[in-house]
Image (tube, helix red, strand yellow):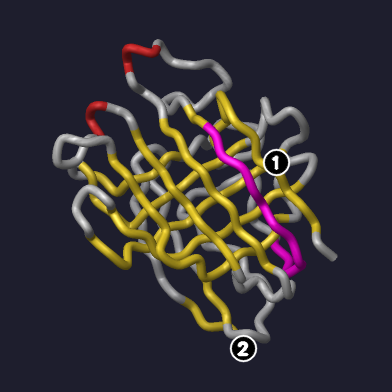
């Protein structure tokens, strides 16, 4: 039996309308519905795994090139997620996300998002990621304001070692400066993830 939880996001870069699916314990993985077609992250399966690591993204544009340091146009994060039972329900998960862009500052500080609950995690079987790809999400807190219970979704790509073509993307049900907050890269090889400019994502099958 599948239980649907809606998260309508108008993501600034690609204007997505996103529905996040969460599941009862005996569910199977269900792909999210995206407002505009994506090349990847359409097909999912429930299987035991964990994804670990952290990194940096220089978005925009979200390519493998770093922006000038003085611009502060980059994002940094640490994240891990685990589904031990292979039921698409996250057993463990954490996310700490900081957007250093000047225009994304909230209350005078870089936007800081901290996951408080990771509710679903499913392996993407069609993403162009050599070692593994995951779609996961849950609830977070906006550290700048103390706002709790904000829905978020992540697309996560381990594209081999040493991490130079790994990818990560996030969309949040949060309005920042008049737009729903998202860091997504529809032109990347593992759409909608943006290419890491530092760090590494590590996919670990556990079955």
Q: Residue furthest right?
A: 207
Identify which residue is drawn at 65% across, 71% down.
88
For the residue pair 161 and 192, the one nearer the viewer reads as 161
SS for tag 2?
A: loop
Please give the label number shown on residue 158: 1
- The percent position of residue 125, horizontal first and vertical second, equals 75, 55
Task: State the extent of the magenta-drawn residues as a range.
Answer: 44-55
Q: Which residue is mark 2?
A: 1
> How far is mark 2 from mark 1, CA to CA?
30 Å
- The percent position of residue 176, horizontal first and vertical second, equals 23, 45
SS for tag 1?
A: strand
Residue 111 is covered by the magenta coloring: no
Q: Residues within 10 Å of mark 1 (few under 14, many from 20)?
A: many
For the residue pair 28 and 163, the one nearer the viewer reads as 163
For the residue pair 199 and 39, the one nearer the viewer reads as 199
Q: Which quadrant: the C terminus?
A: bottom right
Total marks shown come to 2
- The percent position of residue 145, horizontal first and vertical second, equals 19, 53
């Amino acid at each position: 039996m599948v239980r649907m939880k809606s998260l309508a996001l108008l993501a600034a870069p690609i204007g997505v309308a996103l529905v996040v699916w969460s599941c009862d314990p005996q569910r199977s993985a269900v792909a999210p519905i995206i407002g505009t077609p994506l090349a990847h992250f359409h097909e999912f399966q429930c299987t035991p795994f964990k994804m670990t690591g952290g990194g940096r993204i220089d978005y925009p544009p979200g390519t493998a090139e770093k922006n000038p340091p003085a611009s502060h146009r980059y994002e940094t994060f640490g994240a891990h997620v685990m589904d031990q039972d292979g039921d698409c329900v996250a057993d463990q998960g954490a996310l700490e996300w900081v957007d250093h862009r000047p225009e994304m500052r909230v209350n005078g500080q870089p936007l800081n998002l901290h996951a408080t609950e990771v509710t679903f995690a499913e392996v993407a079987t069609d993403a162009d990621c050599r070692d593994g790809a995951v779609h996961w999400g849950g609830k977070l807190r906006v550290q700048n304001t103390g706002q709790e219970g904000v829905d978020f979704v992540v697309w996560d790509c381990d594209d081999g070692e040493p991490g130079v073509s790994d990818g990560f993307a996030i969309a949040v049900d949060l309005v920042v400066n008049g737009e729903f907050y998202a860091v997504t890269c529809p032109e990347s090889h593992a759409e909608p993830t943006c290419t890491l400019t530092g760090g590494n994502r590590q996919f670990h099958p556990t079955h």
